[in-house]
Image: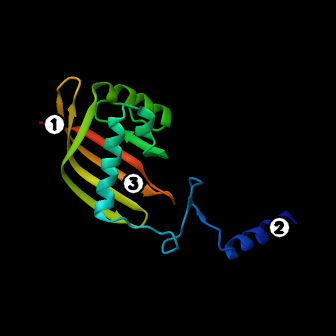
Amino acid sequence: MKTLLLALLAVACLLSAGCAATTSSGNHASPVGAPGHVTPTEQEVAALFDRWNESLQTGDPEAVVDNYAERSILLPTVSNTPRLTRAEQIDYFEHFLENQPSGTVTMRQITRGPDMAVDSGLYTFHFARTGDEVKARYSFTYRWDGTQWLIVSHHSSAMPE
């Protein structure tokens, strides 16, 4: 009886217009080609870096981390510790923001696809408090969550030379 009920629920879900596919992580995602499927322009992807950089200017680590998806990874420039949770990401930005950073992209390559985008290249951070400058490589991977673009992977590393 329970098996029959589950089968009927599954069929009803498949037939209903509001049923979304579920990924293995439990997040809801629209099937490829479904209404709501989004491919950003290059300008929209570039603007996502600007949004992130502007959140740095607030000095509020929570405002910065609001740019990251709940399930995301931050591989930061000035820490050896990968940051997987919101609390870990906030901890990193609490320290990073102390020196009042501002980033400038100096070279980038953008790759766009359905519900995903990658912005990779080089940026330079200027630290207003110390006057220091750090040149680094970066990669931001963004995913459309149905309402906004969020960072799912952010890797940054200082230039080796």
Residue indicated by mark 1: 160
In this rendering, is residue 50 above or below 94?
below
In this rendering, is residue 36 above or below 97?
below
**Coloring applied to the structure:** rainbow
Q: Residue at x 53, y 70 (%)?
A: 31
In the image, farthest residue toward the front = 58
Q: Which circle's residue, 2 or 3, is located before the other in the chain?
A: 2
Cα separation, mark 2 vs mark 3, equals 38 Å
Residue indicated by mark 2: 5
Q: Residue at x 29, y 30 (%)?
A: 78
Quarter of the rendering containing residue 12: bottom right
In this rendering, is residue 135 above or below 95?
below
Cα separation, mark 2 vs mark 1, equals 60 Å
Q: Contact, CB < 8 Å: mark 2 with mark 3?
A: no
- Name the kind of residue labelled 3 in the image: Tyr
Give the crowd class for mark 2: few <14, some 14-19, many >=20 residues within 10 Å. few
Q: Name the residue nearer the viewer: 111 or 161.
A: 111
Place of residue 114 in the rendered image (x, y in percent of width and height, measured from the top left): 41, 67
Disc nearest the viewer among 1 and 3? 3
Residue indicated by mark 3: 142
Give the crowd class for mark 1: few <14, some 14-19, many >=20 residues within 10 Å. few
